[in-house]
Image (cartoon, rainbow, N blue to C red):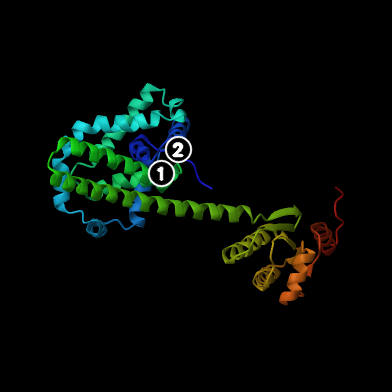
């Protein structure tokens, strides 16, 4: 799963670099249609700056790994006039590539949109030739990585787009400068700066993606542990899927909280949707049952299938201290008997 959000115009340049063909069309179309908050208005990039520990010392380490020295930055600053001469051509050639694709033609027929995208792209391109590689520069590039993850742009697309970018830069360097040694040095400095950008954007992408996955897993666990009240002082917890340690802890927490909140006397735990019940899962269920008992609630375990029953016997799983029934319906009937009530008619 992926959370899809829009990216702001300040990030469009970076996002655009990562797009090609259909991915470009879908992402920008989504940006224009969506009315969601823009990432640049929030602290996202600063959040990941802290996570990646991007301080002065880390910046120095990254530069050292890429051999991006002050001489390279000075050379890039000297190349600024070169970049300014060819900015429009580089951007136009890149768009020509996109406009040659059928899926792009249908979308990029809005001249105002194309003009805006080209403008932000030019700004990003010229940013490579500022001669800066400080923390402010890093924050600009962090926004790119965050935006990529938010709209689902994968690193392979980002890398492919930068390859095209470097190809165009080498082409124009070779046209403008006859000195092959200078072209080699200039292109080497550009490569180092581009790789620096890529390292920041990709690290940010993966950090953001990991957080997205973690949030989604937490949401899934929340949704897959629903404690509902089926009748006065009777609770039902239907479990579906595997039960690992984090989820087992959540099951116990949710059950105990619901028992206390509803003054429940009976809790039905239905495991018809749990594919495997081994000794580990059984221990979790026994602990939950014991904890609920301390709060005055009895527990009924329902939904044990024949195959699960056989595997439990083979594994030596002991649930003799728990009340068990085969079907959820039987569990509900038993709950009413425990309370001395008759089950309401449907």
Residue reaching furthest bottom? 316
* Residue corresponding to mark 2: 23
Q: SS of the residue at dot 1?
A: helix
Say if 103 sits above or below 298 in the image.
above
Determine which quarter of the picture holds residue 7.
top left
Q: SS of the residue at dot 2?
A: helix
Say if 215 sits above or below 286 in the image.
above
Residue at 38 percent across and 36 percent down: it is 8
Residue at 18 percent across and 47 percent down: it is 184
Determine which quarter of the picture holds residue 169.
top left
Answer left or right for 174 relative to 22: left
Residue 123: where, in percent of width, then height?
26, 35
Answer left or right for 72 relative to 12: left
Image marks 2 and 1: residues in contact by CB distance under 8 Å: yes
Answer left or right for 238 relative to 36: right
Q: CA distance from mark 2 to mark 1?
A: 8 Å
Q: Nearer the viewer, residue 264 or 159?
A: 159
Q: Pick whichever of labels 2 and 1 is earlier in the sequence.
A: 2
The local crowd at label 1, few if under 14, some if 14 to 19, many if 20 or more residues have their Cα within 10 Å, is some
Residue at 27 percent across and 38 percent down: it is 168
Residue 218: where, in percent of width, then height?
55, 55
Count the labels in the image: 2
Residue 6: where, in percent of width, then height?
44, 37
Residue at 23 percent across and 41 percent down: it is 170
Q: Which mark is residue 157?
A: 1
Q: Is residue 192 visible?
A: yes
Determine which quarter of the picture holds residue 340.
bottom right
Residue 71: where, in percent of width, then height?
13, 51
Q: Is residue 317 visible?
A: no
The local crowd at label 2, few if under 14, some if 14 to 19, many if 20 or more residues have their Cα within 10 Å, is some
Q: Which mark is residue 6?
A: none
Say if 15 sits above or below 72 in the image.
above
């Amino acid at each position: 799963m992926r959370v899809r959000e829009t990216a702001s115009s300040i990030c469009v340049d970076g996002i655009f670099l990562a797009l090609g063909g259909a991915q470009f069309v879908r992402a920008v179309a989504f940006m224009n249609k969506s009315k969601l908050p823009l990432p640049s208005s929030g602290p996202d990039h600063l959040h990941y700056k802290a996570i990646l520990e991007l301080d002065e010392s880390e910046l120095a380490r990254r530069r050292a790994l890429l051999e991006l020295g002050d001489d390279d930055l000075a050379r890039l600053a000297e190349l600024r006039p070169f970049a300014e001469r060819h900015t429009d051509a580089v951007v136009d050639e890149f768009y020509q590539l996109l406009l040659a694709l059928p899926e792009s033609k249908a979308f990029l027929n809005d001249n105002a949109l194309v003009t805006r995208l080209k403008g932000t792209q030019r700004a990003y391109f010229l940013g490579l030739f500022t001669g800066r590689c400080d923390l402010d520069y890093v924050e600009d590039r962090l926004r790119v990585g965050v935006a990529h993850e938010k709209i689902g742009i994968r690193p392979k697309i980002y890398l492919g787009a930068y390859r095209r970018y470097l190809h165009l830069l080498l082409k124009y360097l070779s046209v403008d400068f006859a000195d092959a040694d200078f072209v080699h040095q200039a292109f080497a400095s550009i490569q180092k700066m581009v790789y620096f950008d890529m390292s920041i954007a990709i690290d940010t992408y993966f950090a953001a993606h990991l957080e997205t996955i973690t949030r989604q897993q937490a949401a899934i666990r929340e949704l897959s542990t629903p404690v509902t009240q089926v009748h006065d002082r009777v609770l039902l917890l239907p479990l579906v899927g595997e039960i690992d340690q984090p989820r087992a802890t959540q099951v116990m927490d949710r059950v105990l909280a619901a028992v206390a909140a509803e003054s429940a006397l009976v809790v039905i735990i239905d495991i018809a949707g749990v594919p495997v019940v081994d000794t580990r899962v059984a221990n979790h269920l026994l602990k939950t049952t014991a904890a609920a008992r301390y709060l005055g609630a009895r527990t009924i375990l329902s939904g044990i299938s024949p195959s699960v029953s056989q595997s439990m016997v083979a594994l030596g799983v002991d649930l003799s201290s728990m009340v068990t029934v085969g079907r959820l319906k039987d569990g509900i009937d038993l709950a009413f008997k425990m309370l001395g009530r008759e089950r309401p008619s449907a």
